[in-house]
Image (cartoon, rainbow, N blue to C red):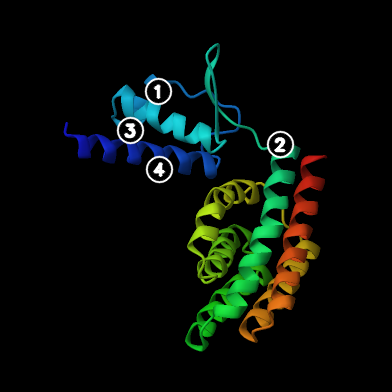
């Protein structure tokens, strides 16, 4: 196998293993043996080890010499830290998006917002998760800050994992819809202060919801 093929195999193992962790196909705390992962992806031990090391650096896997590799758990502290970072950085991304979004791009944000709103109204909560990721991803991408996007990438991945644990109800759904409306309207009208404030309020509210659930 050539060097390029090895790199591609390592990336494939990393991507697919990470996706199974983010979607909870592999449960929190589950052991991850190199032999088992090698069989899953028809890979040698080297790309498996490389994938596990990368996931450890991103805090999705815990590695210990004594016990081996395990899927990390979503703890109270995990949620608190992720959402504190999101509040500041996504607030900034909303401000920059409101500042930079072109008139031709506004309709794209509105389309995503409406699809997400309709999914929540119709209580299609499972469908709303990827739409919510797309909504926030659009705003981050259109902040026009490549450095901010790079910094947020790992946080976004942790958020994907955390939000799949949330239990929606009508009251929470309506609150999220109001938050998304305020964010969207502020951005498309170019109100930078309001966009940042609305995003920070939304992230802070989401943090409180998540922490309340995990504390039960």
The x and y percentages for residue 28 are 60, 32
As drawn, the label of residue 75 is 2
Report helix, strand or loop for mark 1.
helix
Nearest to N terminus: mark 3 or mark 1: 1
The x and y percentages for residue 29 are 60, 27
The residue located at (78%, 46%) in the rendering is: 211
- Is residue 193 visible in the rendered image? The answer is yes
Q: Are marks 3 and 4 in contact (CB under 8 Å)?
A: no
Nearest to N terminus: mark 4 or mark 1: 4
Which residue is denoted by mark 1 in the rendering? 36
- The quarter of the picture where the C terminus appears is top right
As drawn, the label of residue 41 is 3
Q: Are marks 2 and 3 in contact (CB under 8 Å)?
A: no
The x and y percentages for residue 133 are 56, 60
C-alpha gap between disc 2 and disc 1:
26 Å
C-alpha gap between disc 4 and disc 1:
16 Å
Marks 3, 4: nearer the viewer: 4
């Amino acid at each position: 196998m050539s060097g390029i093929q090895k790199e591609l195999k390592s990336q494939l193992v990393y991507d697919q293993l990470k996706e199974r962790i983010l979607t909870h196909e592999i449960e929190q705390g589950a052991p991850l043996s190199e032999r088992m992962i090698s069989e899953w992806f028809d890979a040698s031990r080297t790309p498996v080890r490389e994938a596990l090391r990368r996931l450890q650096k991103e805090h999705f896997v815990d590695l210990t010499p004594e016990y081996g590799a395990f899927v990390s758990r979503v703890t109270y502290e995990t949620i608190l830290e992720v959402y504190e970072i999101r509040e500041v950085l996504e607030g900034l991304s909303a401000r920059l998006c409101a500042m930079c979004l072109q008139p031709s791009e506004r309709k794209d944000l509105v389309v995503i917002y409406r699809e997400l709103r309709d999914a929540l109204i119709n209580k299609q909560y499972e469908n709303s998760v990827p739409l919510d990721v797309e909504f926030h991803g659009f705003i981050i991408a259109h902040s026009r800050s490549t450095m901010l996007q790079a910094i947020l990438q790992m946080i976004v991945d942790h958020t994907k994992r955390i939000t799949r644990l949330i239990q929606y109800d009508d009251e929470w759904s309506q609150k999220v819809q109001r938050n998304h409306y305020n964010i969207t309207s502020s951005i498309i009208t170019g109100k930078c202060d309001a966009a940042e404030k609305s995003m920070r309020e939304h992230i802070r509210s989401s943090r409180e919801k998540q922490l309340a659930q995990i504390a039960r």
